[in-house]
Amino acid sequence: GESVGLHLPTLSVQEGDNSIINCAYSNSASDYFIWYKQESGKGPQFIIDIRSNMDKRQGQRVTVLLNKTVKHLSLQIAATQPGDSAVYFCAVPGADKLIFGTGTRLQVFP
Amino acid sequence: NAGVMQNPRHLVRRRGQEARLRCSPMKGHSHVYWYRQLPEEGLKFMVYLQKENIIDESGMPKERFSAEFPKEGPSILRIQQVVRGDSAAYFCASSLGQGRSYEQYFGPGTRLTVT
């Protein structure tokens, strides 16, 4: 079955720096990937997605990179702000449900 | 507010009591998913329902847990005879379905504490 894992449980960055959050997946047949942001006490919020026919997708201050060869994707946040502090999850669809990774906690310090 | 609504937001139950968690999907959505999140962990799928039908309950424990999504009213996740291990955040998500089940919108969650 599909499993999704993250390399680092906690990432601390200084305000204004760029953040990179990584995610590994196991099913080479996965063709769609989603990043969610979960702030304390709230439900997951969609950030950005990418399909397997793309290597890169950009949003507002966020970029997702997909490396299908090594089954790895990353979320890059430019000019990290205090409001970016949250837990970030990657997720892949699996038979009508989403399979989430463990999550990376992003801490932004001044 | 047209988003997914869950209530209660916080629920405290003693061991052996019943917990009922409610979820109203986004307007126009007829597909509901329940996930459980233990502290410092990711969300784990429990059950997927459409109106009056359970489509996939592969992630739900066989005993004490049940879910429904009636023709009228919210979806309900019911936990009977709760134990301390049931303490978690329970999230509901909804989607349009119809091949877009991966576009799921999440509610704020219900945090269940079993004492």
Image (spheres, rainbow, N blue to C red):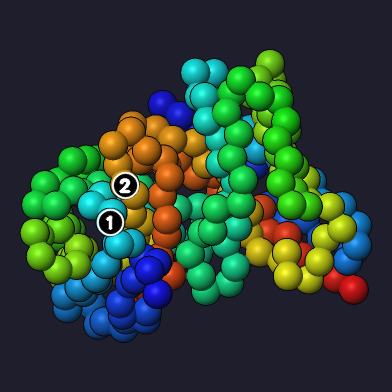
- Left or right of residue A2: residue A101: right
Does the residue at mark 2 contact the one at mark 1 (Cβ under 8 Å)?
A: yes
**What residue type is disc 1 on?**
Gly
Q: Which residue is mark 2?
A: B96
Tell me if residue A67 comes above or below residue B72 in the rendering: above
Tell me if residue A93 comes above or below residue A89 in the rendering: above
Quarter location, residue A79: bottom right
In the image, residue A12 lies at what x, y percent? 82, 60
At numbered mark 1, what does the secondary structure look like: helix, strand or loop?
A: loop
Q: Is residue B79 visible?
A: no
Q: CA distance from mark 2 to mark 1?
A: 7 Å
Mark identifier at residue B63: none
Q: Are marks 2 and 1 on the same chain?
A: yes
At numbered mark 2, what does the secondary structure look like: helix, strand or loop?
A: loop
Q: Earlier in the sequence, mark 2 or mark 1?
A: 1
Q: Is residue A102 visible?
A: yes
In the image, residue A101 lies at what x, y percent? 54, 44
How crowded is the residue under tag 2: few (<14 C-alpha within 10 Å), some, or many (20+)? some
Residue in the picture at 59% in, 40% down: A49
Which quadrant of the rendered structure holds the N terminus of chain A? Answer: top left
In the image, residue B111 lies at what x, y percent? 39, 74
Quarter location, residue A95: top left
- Left or right of residue A24: residue B59: left
Q: Which residue is mark 1?
A: B28
Which quadrant of the rendered structure holds the C terminus of chain A? Answer: bottom right
* Camera-nearest residue between B3 and B92: B3
Residue in the picture at 73% in, 70% down: A83
Quarter location, residue B79: bottom left
In the image, residue B108 lies at what x, y percent? 43, 70
**What residue type is disc 2 on?**
Leu
Residue in the picture at 41% in, 40% down: B102
